[in-house]
Amino acid sequence: MFIVKNKLVRTMKFLNLCILALGCSLNMAAQNAPVTPPIMGWSSWNTYRVNINDTLIKKQADAMVQAGLKDAGYTFINIDDGFFGWRDEKGVLHTHPQRFPNGVKGVVEHIHSLGLKAGIYSDAGSNTCGSIWDNDANGIGVGLYGFEHQDANLYFNEWGFDFIKIDYCGACQELSLDEEKRYMEIRQAIDKVAGSHIAVNVCRWAFPGTWARNVGSSWRISPDITPEWRSVKSIIAKNMYLSAYAGGGHYNDMDMLEIGRGLSQQEEEVHFGMWCIMSSPLMIGCDLTTIPSASLELLKNPELIALNQDPLGLQAYVVQHEGESYVLVKDIEQERGKVRAVALYNPSDEPCDFSVPLEVLELGGKVNVRDLVKRQDLPAVKEILKKHLPPHSVLLLRMEAERRLEPSRYEAEWAYLPCYNDLALRPKGVLYAPMAEASGGMKVSYLGGRKENYAEWNKVYSEQGGLYEMTVFYVPDKYRKLEVKVNNEKTVSLNKLEEGNGKSLASLSIRVHLKAGYNVVRMGASYCWAPDIDCFTLKRIGEPD
Ligand code: GLA
């Protein structure tokens, strides 16, 4: 009996292990399943604004193929504002009588005949942005407002477009609608009439909120780009702390590219390189028939394109920030593998010396380094990466280590904040805020007050699982409370926080159990403000139970 029982126990243990292994490998497979990458293509707005026509669009589509950009991965030709004519008494939309006298269907057919995809533009309200900013009278009354189903049928079923960018000028200037509700109505109309395969871009010129991923595959995070260094720099700054919202085939859109429109070679490298490592859509905005050859070569750089189209679809995040310099990193090729992409970014007007301990990048042992812009191997490094960068420049690296190290610090500015948006709609909304004393120079402010307003780190990684000491660095304020949840199970409520002057930091340590693999950590306070959070660190102090 004893032997039989023993055998049974062994068999059960074996089966359990098999189920565990199967679960793990399914989990890994799900984690490593490729996602739809950011879209790549050309769009008419940056060079032509509303002055477009059918011949021009067809010529640009031809040039995209001839210049080798289609082969490099660029597939969309997007018609932006300017094609609108008028809406007739039945509500049917017509194209501009001079610019598109024969409609756009033929243009779409031409684009498709080249093996490319076609994108179109509209507004969530009644009037387009061009009607306001470019005095395009034909843009009045042609937006989607009140015509969602009819226009979706026309754009996607009759004309055959594959993508739509939905602007917000009309909706915010004349109608003052609720963004989330309005965009959801339009998404539902598109799904009903044409199908969920139609890609949507939300164009609200600021990070609109976490709802945007239910509407579109990308959303603009900034005002319109211009072909000037200060514009490129300000958009990168806007996207610096939005990595938590990209992922799973959804991307922060840094706007159409100004490559080939007068920036210096080095500034173009920053522009393209940062759009690539931040996984922004790559929509070329210059005249493809006259593009300078250096700009064309940059746009076709296969190693930078691979960085942007990487199967993990992640956005790089800031791991070191000193003065005006930034170091960003993201996993590529395999999650938590030994290969990572790194950007050393110097937006300042002065040269800058970078000194990056490799453990900050979670890389151990000897690390092979490749320059992705120059497409050259650089000398391997150990322990520290030191580089000197000129002003307005970036070094984009593929780094392959001997070992991947377990992270020990999680910044607040990496956290996913479900209630965050950058629309400045209400005071005291949760946000990422600068704080000189904080690690990385950033903290999260206005957490708590209600259950939903928390900060979440959903990839807190432990190699083997175990007991950890978690130290939370926060801005002390004795009237606030902090709730910490690990894997939605254990809640630690801390009611006795230190008093402070709002400028210095305090820390508190708690013991938490982490399972092997990814863990989810949440911080907030359900009924009163939580303190501002700088970061938390983890130190393993014991074996798993
Ligand atoms: C807004 C958008 C631009 C462009 C114009 C068209 O400004 O942000 O990208 O589409 O409208 O009028």
Image: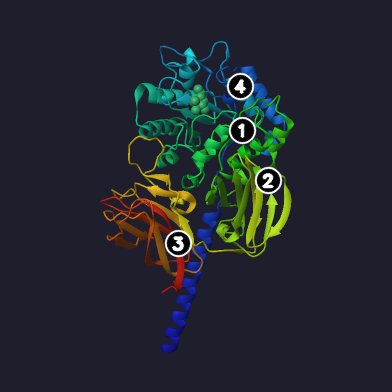
In this view, 91 is above or below 26: above
Task: Give the residue number, with chain letter if any, for mark 3.
Answer: 537
Which quadrant, please, contains the C terminus?
bottom left
Please tell me whether mark 2 sits on a helix, a strand or a loop: helix
* Residue at the (63%, 41%) spot, across then down: 391
* Residue at the (72%, 45%) spot, across then down: 374
Residue 209: image quadrant is: top left
Separation of residues labelled 1 and 2 (CA atoms)? 17 Å
Task: Give the residue number, with chain letter if any, for mark 4.
Answer: 107
In the drawing, what numbered circle is on residue 308?
none
Separation of residues labelled 3 and 1 (CA atoms)? 42 Å
Q: Amino acid at mark 3?
A: Thr
Between circles 3 and 1, the one closer to the viewer is 3
The mark nearer the N terminus, 3 or 1, is 1
Please tell me whether mark 1 sits on a helix, a strand or a loop: strand
The mark nearer the N terminus, 4 or 1, is 1
Percent x, y for residue 317? Answer: 52, 49
The mark nearer the N terminus, 4 or 3, is 4
Q: Is residue 156 visible?
A: no
Between circles 3 and 2, the one closer to the viewer is 3
Q: Nearer the viewer, residue 33 or 481?
A: 481
Between circles 4 and 1, the one closer to the viewer is 1
Q: Amino acid at mark 1?
A: Gly
Percent x, y for residue 531? Answer: 33, 53
Percent x, y for residue 116? Answer: 63, 31
Please tell me whether mark 3 sits on a helix, a strand or a loop: strand
The mark nearer the N terminus, 4 or 2, is 4
Between circles 1 and 2, the one closer to the viewer is 2
Percent x, y for residue 114? Answer: 67, 29
Task: Give the residue number, with chain letter if any, for mark 2.
Answer: 303
